[in-house]
Amino acid sequence: MNTTMNAPATQAGTLDIRGLRLTLPGTARPVLDGVDLTVAPGETVSLVGESGSGKTLTSRSALCLLPPGAVTEGTVRVNGDDVLTADADRLRALRTGTVAMVFQDPRAALNPLRRIGDFLTEGVRATRTAARARATARATELLGAVGLDDTVLRKYPGQVSGGMLQRVMIAAALMGEPALLLADEPTTALDVTTQAEVVALLARLRERFATALLFVTHDLDLAAAISDRVYVMYAGRIAEHGPAKQLFEHPRHPYTAALLASTPRLERTGGRLSAIEGRPPGLSTALTGCAFAARCPLATEVCDERPPELRPVPGHPEHRAACHHSELLEGSADA
Amino acid sequence: MPEPTDVKVLEVSGLRRSFGAVRAVDDVSFAVPEGGSLGIVGESGSGKTTAARIIVGLERADAGEIRVRGRSRTPRVRGRAQRLARAREVQMVFQDPYLSLDPRTSVGAVLRETLRLHFPHIDHGRRVRELLDQVGLGSRAAEALPRRLSGGQRQRVAIARALAVEPAVLVLDEAVAALDVSVQAQILNLLADIRERTPIGYLFITHDLGVVRCVTDDVIVMRRGRVVEAGATADVLGGPRHPYTRLLMDSVPRPGWDPERIAAARRAL
Amino acid sequence: MTAVLTRRPGLSGIRAAGSPLHLICLALVVLVVTAAVLAPWLVPHDPNVVDLGSALAGTSADHPLGVDAAGRDTLSRLLLGARTSLLGPLEVVAFSTLAGVAVGTAAAWRGGRLDSLLSRSTELVFAFPGMLLAILIISVYGEGLLAPVIALAIAYLPYVSRLTRSLVLAERARPYVSAYRVQGHSALQICLRHVLPNIAPVVLAQATINFGYALMDLAGLSFLGLGIPALTPDWGRMVFDGQTAVQHGYPLSAILPCVVIVLTVVAFNVVGERWADRVARRDR
């Protein structure tokens, strides 16, 4: 399933973000600063970060859903087409077909006054002039795929549970047969047992429809559990990326390591958590060096002077970390 | 840490509350020893938040008794003295730090307001500085309005506000759920520090078993209003006896996690 | 938020940001209020001195805006009339806002039976035209400014109370209110210190809009000869007095107060709507 990362130039990913830099008016530093990210066809990639890290903006750039006043550099390609320079018609086609999105709070993303059936079919009917019967047939089929029956079609969002609603959202996202599914914290508003169900569903659907999945989350454990590759973002930059297991077990960026260490876990036996002191840099301070330097136990002068570049970890070419002292973390498998 | 003694700061017995036909809280009993920490774990609809709201007095119980330091908590309050006495028994920290502070009131004013109400005769300026220091905020934060603070800082203010009353029990309703992981660890450590220094008892309402593991001595697991399992945290999480507890534990994502199996187990339960 | 200010959609163009019209309206509001406050020192003539010799005279150096049919100076009457014409709506707005906020807050806070009682009875007032109510009260109480003011205040109260009720309901659901309750603050303290200041901007914006409507309604009443005593200078009354002059081909003394009423109402509405927009946009 995992496509090779070594030759991204020859094999265009379903989503291919290169050097994306996004600046908003009134901020001292770019909100996104040189983000490179690829999602290969059929691959599941997680994008992990705290609030304000730019993870949501990065995922939304695939739909060109950018905040007003945003100035961008770099390219965002979906199936080879540049999204940022696309005209309105192409964007519309992109949003209704190629790329679909599942939001964090399904209740907020649905119009409570319309039946679920109408919600499911309106996108297809609006763009492809598919007949009502055909659209409904497809909706029923997809609801079956997400484990719901067609009685849901007649119901209103208020009449079903949050977990069911999120499954409806996923079915709706699949209506346009997308090549790429963007899931922005799709399980954060759900209970833990429901989360497992939704994740299981996403995994099943990915195999069945060969959809590429970009899973945006703040939960590193969840990301490691479900995805092929993981990107960790901090203050608008990619701090580290690599195969999920490798990154989780041998983090090569102090931020990833600290994040893993500060997560309260079942296996942990009492004692204090090793919290990361301080907080992420705000948008009002310009960054001269590494964004994490102020909170980093390994930081030296060089970290304040120039930003580290993403360098491959020796022996693991597909695992890259942006840290001047990456090698110091070698062997610190458990955090 | 003061060793947990036999004195119970909080005793809840036979708590019941129905909303229409739904039994939100159904015969729930537990106790928190002095200086102890009890976790209530459950998913949405388990009744854990309703139980918490009954204990702090935001909701009424149909039946059951709540005793704080052996004194029964009366459901109806009459007059200012009773209201203040009740407030000094139990305080609460809410989930959403963005909504639990009045947007128009500065941090210092929030604390002074509480101190004026409960301790009109002490030096408020000094106590405000003490409280801010206790929760790891500088005195400069006193002038700030909530919108100038980050989520973690706001939650520190909310904790300081609860501590200002010097309550016997602190109810924490998903108090770290809305925070980022790195900030969450800071707040959990802060709460552990406070418990070391004061005889305060914690009632920790959460859905996160990792958090329970970190900050509680005992735990009860609630499902559909009922307690399905109770015991020392290490025992319950070390060897869960009820299938629901096991399901909850299995649902926590980790490497080698099999969501498909969990989904099947959930349907079977 | 479900709370919606009652207002006119047609003014949306005028409300646009940076519109010079808004500035003109703001200046107009300031001008009218200043004129009302300083009127006794500004008037060139006693507004009630009858100078029949120059009745219906046009503009002149002595009478810049002419003289009405009874020989009274129009400018002086307009200036002094601003006092009655603005004081009335001010009292209406003050009373309806205070009482409406009290009723709305009580209904939302206590809920249950008190809520139904208060909400139903204010809705009853909705069903009864304000002007009709005013005429009814005036016919009982007789002449004077008090009766129409009370009548209109009652008629305007439901707009404020309904808005307040929905605002307080939304505010009350916020955890900070629960936090204060857990802390042992009394309901009254929480309402006065926290809930009301948080909803005040929206309510005050509605009050400003109400001011314009109240001015128009009061002017209408005094045009009908109700309420304002005959000799008191008042814009609505001036329009009424000017009717005969219009029939005789001297429209100035009737048209001027009309223009002043319309401009003042529009100015207050635009300023109020703009304020309401700003409040609605403000992010918390």
Image: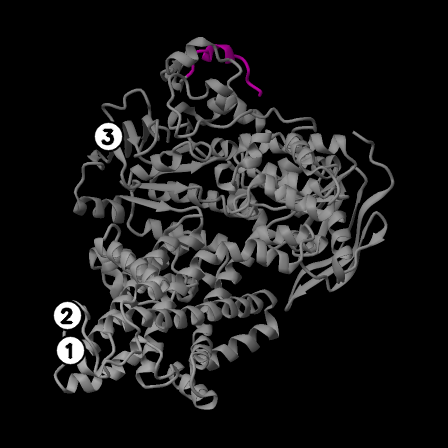
Q: Secondary structure at mark 3?
A: strand
Indicate which disc residue A75 carries: 3
Judging from the image, mark 2 belongs to the subunit labelled C
Percent across and percent down for residue C216 are: 32, 74
Residue C234, percent from left and from top = 32, 76
Q: Is residue B166 above or below residue A8?
A: below
Q: Is residue A243 visible?
A: yes
Residue C82 image-quadrant placement: bottom left
Residues at marks 1 and 3, CA–CA distance in whole angstroms: 78 Å
Residue A332 magenta-highlighted: yes
The residue under the point 15% across, 87% down is C247
Residue B176 shows in the view: no
Identify the residue under disc 2: C60
Q: Which residue is mark 1?
A: C57
Asked if the residue at tag 2 contacts the one at tag 1, i.e. Cβ–Cβ closer than 8 Å, the answer is yes
Instruction: Identify residue type, mark 2.
Output: Ser
Subunit of label 1: C
Q: Secondary structure at mark 2?
A: loop
The CA distance from mark 2 to mark 3 is 75 Å
Decide: few, some or many residues near mark 3? Use Cα within 10 Å; few <14, some 14-19, many ≥20. Answer: many
In the foreground, B168 or B11: B168
C173 and C31: which one is in front? C31
Labelled pair 2, 3 in contact (Cβ < 8 Å) = no
Q: State the residue in front, B77 or A183.
A: B77
Q: How is the model colour-coded?
A: one colour
Magenta-colored segment: predominant secondary structure: loop
Q: At numbered mark 1, what does the secondary structure look like: helix, strand or loop? A: loop
> What amino acid is at disc 1?
Ala
